[in-house]
Image (cartoon, rainbow, N blue to C red):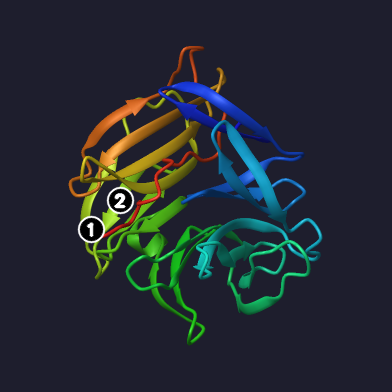
Amino acid sequence: MKHNTLTCVRHDKAYWDYDFDAPLKDLESLPGYYLVTGGSQQVSLLKKEWKGCTPLWDWSDFSGISVESAVVADWDERDKPSLILAADSAAPKLFLADAKGKDPKVRWEYKLTAAPLKVHLCTDTGNFLVILKDSTVEEVFFQQDKVIWQLGKADGLANIRDAVRDPWANTYVADAATGDIFCFGPQKQLSWKTHLPFAPGAFEEMSLALFRDNHKRMVMAAVHFAGNGKEARNVIYLLNAETGKVAAWNDHDDKGGYPSFLKAVPDKAEYFKKQ
């Protein structure tokens, strides 16, 4: 995401751009769709095309909210998104609403103790994993409106920027205070910790995504560095999800650098398929 632009990069080269009218905040790549948070549209659903995408609906008329992150929470019988889980910093709260642009109905709300940064689905339980700006990760059991699992400063995490959960109940956490990626097991035991190499400046934005590469479970960490007074840099790291070992990292394309981004995700539909 380059400022207000969704960019598709293939083999380290920009393939196409799709522009928005204000900065983007979050992105989810889905089978056949992109769900984008940001711009004046708040949340947009885009249909994937060969060289771009087509807008299907947005929440530009949904008043009184400031969505920081959104994910698809349910699908209909035609395999189209039917329910969106959104993290709102205006309240702050989590809420579920219809996946449509005209008069979307809010189906559920949950008040948060701090403003949210990101929200994800827990692929092991179906619960909601929310990252708060006070450096806390909470798993919300929405059927009972309560937090059932939590990580934060008491666990040695100072500046959590993102966290994701895999089907085996492992939670991967990105901490910008130290530039480390952590893997915690189901009982919050630390499985591994990896300090990301090649740091051209202070760690700022960090985002995580899970995917498979030749049947290996991988973690993608996309990092925006401040640059220590020089030009800011963007680096994409690939880590083995089982060991934490850095398999590869890349900070440039044919023009010498990735477009400035807040988040990068692999364009694969089978992120979390348990095989």
Q: Is residue 3 visible?
A: no
Position of residue 114 measured from the top left corner of the image (x, y, whole percent)? 59, 66
Number of the label disc, if any, that sits on residue 45: none
**Position in image of residue 45 (x %, y %):** 63, 52
Q: Report which quarter residue 112 is drawn in.
A: bottom right
Residue at the limit of the structure toward the bottom, as seen here:
144
247 on left or right of 257: left
**Which residue carries the number 2 mark?**
182
Quadrant containing the N terminus in the rendered view: top right
Direction top: furthest residue: 255
Residue beneath the point at 35% across and 73% down? 125
| x then y, percent, for residue 166 | 31, 59
Q: Quadrant of the C terminus?
A: bottom left
Amino acid on which disc 1 is placed:
Leu
Q: Check contact, mark 1 vs mark 2: CB within 8 A.
A: yes
Few, some or many residues within 10 Å of mark 2 (<14, 14–19, 20+): many
Q: Is residue 36 at least partly visible in the picture?
A: yes
Residue identified by numbered label 1: 190
> Whole-percent x and y of residue 262?
55, 39
* Residue type (three-letter) at the residue carrying disc 2: Phe
